[in-house]
Image (cartoon, rainbow, N blue to C red):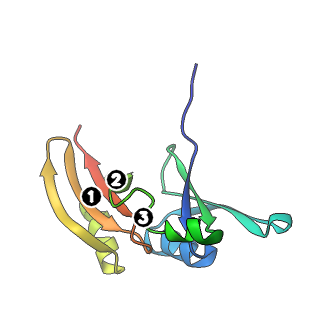
Amino acid sequence: MHQSIALVALVVRDYDEAIAFYVDTLGFTLVEDTPMPAQNKRWVVVAPPGLGGARLLLARAVGDEQIAHIGNQTGGRVFLFLDTDDFWRDYHAYTTKGVVFVREPSEESYGTVAVFKDLYGNLWDLVARRG
């Protein structure tokens, strides 16, 4: 048996501002942007560069409850983990583009890590794993 997580839904305020952040700022690829007029939404999928791994479904919030969770889908814990093959390349590129790091880089037993916020405040680990 083989299973994998293909998509993680990320609640966003607006499709286009989310695409701009993930594609233009973080360097993700826009995999799909398909209008779904019958449901008044779009199917928007982005993915970090490289092979494999889960992709993000950018899901526009609908209704007060979903809107209330934009930027806090995990109650303030780190939500997503972005592995990189070159920590310092990505760290410097992100800081140059205005990404806010809320925990500075540190060396841990598993690798180099820092925590940043996406445009809504969700926390991400940027991680270069050892060996």
Categorize mark 1 by other alpha carbons within 10 Å: few (<14), some (14-19), many (20+).
some
In the image, 121 versus 35, the foreground residue is 121
Q: Look at discs 2 and 3 and give the one toward the viewer.
A: 3
Q: Which mark is residue 87?
A: 1
Residue that carries the numbered disc 2 in the rendered image: 84
Nearest to N terminus: mark 3 or mark 1: 3
Mark 3–mark 1 Cα distance, whole angstroms, equals: 25 Å
Q: What is the x, y in percent for residue 76?
A: 33, 61
Proximity of marks 2 and 1: CB atoms separated by less than 8 Å = yes
Q: What is the x, y in percent for residue 29?
A: 56, 62
Give the residue type that dot 3 points to. Answer: Asn
Q: Is residue 98 above or below residue 62?
A: below
Spot the residue most to the top: 1
Asked which secondary structure carries label 3, the reply is loop
Residue that carries the numbered disc 3 in the rendered image: 72
Q: What is the x, y in percent for residue 44?
A: 66, 63
Q: Look at discs 3 and 1 and give the one toward the viewer.
A: 3
Categorize mark 3 by other alpha carbons within 10 Å: few (<14), some (14-19), many (20+).
some
Asked which secondary structure carries label 2, the reply is loop
For the point 34% across and 72% down, the residue is: 94
Asked which secondary structure carries label 1, the reply is helix
**Would residue 87 be found to the left or right of residue 38 on screen?**
left
Mark 2–mark 1 Cα distance, whole angstroms, equals: 6 Å
For the point 50% across and 63% down, the residue is: 28
Q: Quadrant of the N terminus?
A: top right
